Amino acid sequence: MFYFTKTPAFLKSLYKSCIWNFSPAQPVVYLTFDDGPHPKATPFVLEQLKKYSAKATFFCIGKNVVEHPDIYQQILSEGHVAGNHTHNHLNGWKTSTEAYLDNIREASRYIRTNLFRPPYGRISPFQIKQLKKDYRIIMWDVLSADFDTGISGETCLQNVVFKMQPGSIIVFHDSEKAWDRMSYALPRVLEHCARQGLRMEAIL
């Protein structure tokens, strides 16, 4: 499995209209969580964030919001921000634009937001053009890789701590697959950010 834990400049330049990171001028990082809500992982994440008065952005899958509406409402009621992550976690490279947009519209029935993140980061230029009418497309510059069952929680932690900087958008997953690594790394990332004087804010 190949992926970048730090998004290279050439990739950002290919998709210039997407948001990969924010200005490094302020001591702020942006934690994001993909694929929830999940009955075990999401409440854990919310509990950890609360300990540090941290706010985050949750890119939710529509069908999971339908299955766990109470957890979705908890995300919002605790001051976090929700984003659209399609209804069925579709890969934009393998899905026609019409079907892709329809799936995002289905998710938008349950997720009121102007933020969108493509699953796997895979989206075509034409899909971007269509979505830009209604959404800010949020990518990332630091990938924890908590989805990778071949690495340890410690490696996941190092991926974030050594590669983030002020303005970074960081990806974790509140999912079953990522649980072992995310549940190890997230509390330690939060502690590290607090020690470094970095605020953790949601994307608005």
Image (cartoon, rainbow, N blue to C red):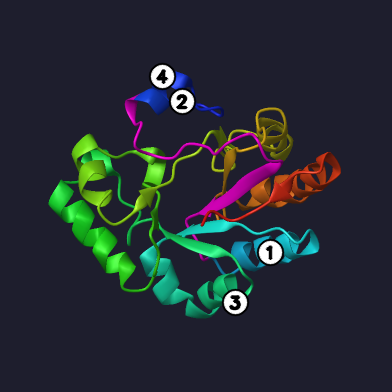
Q: Position of residue 142 (x, y in %)?
A: 57, 34
The residue carrying mark 2 is 2
- Dot in front, 3 or 2: 3
Q: Which numbered disc flags the more N-terminal residue, 1 or 2?
A: 2
Q: Amino acid at mark 4?
A: Phe
Graded by Cα atoms within 10 Å as few (under 14), some (14 to 19) or many (20 or more), the crowding at tag 2 reads few
The secondary element bearing badge 2 is classed as loop
Task: Say if the magenta span includes residue 53.
Answer: no
3D distance between C-alphas at marks 1 and 3:
15 Å
- Asked whether the beta carbons under mark 3 and mark 2 sit within 8 Å of each other, the answer is no
Marker disc for residue 4: none
Graded by Cα atoms within 10 Å as few (under 14), some (14 to 19) or many (20 or more), the crowding at tag 3 reads few
The residue at the point 43 percent across, 45 percent down is 138
The residue carrying mark 4 is 10
- Asked whether the beta carbons under mark 4 and mark 2 sit within 8 Å of each other, the answer is no
185 vs 89: above or below: above
The residue at the point 54 percent across, 65 percent down is 38
Q: Which numbered disc flags the more N-terminal residue, 1 or 4?
A: 4
3D distance between C-alphas at marks 4 and 2:
16 Å
Graded by Cα atoms within 10 Å as few (under 14), some (14 to 19) or many (20 or more), the crowding at tag 4 reads few
Q: Which numbered disc flags the more N-terminal residue, 3 or 2?
A: 2
3D distance between C-alphas at marks 1 and 2:
28 Å
Q: Amino acid at mark 3?
A: Ser
The residue carrying mark 3 is 77
Q: Is residue 103 left or right of residue 45?
A: left
Marker disc for residue 44: 1
Q: Which residues are magenta?
A: 14-37
Q: Amino acid at mark 1?
A: Phe
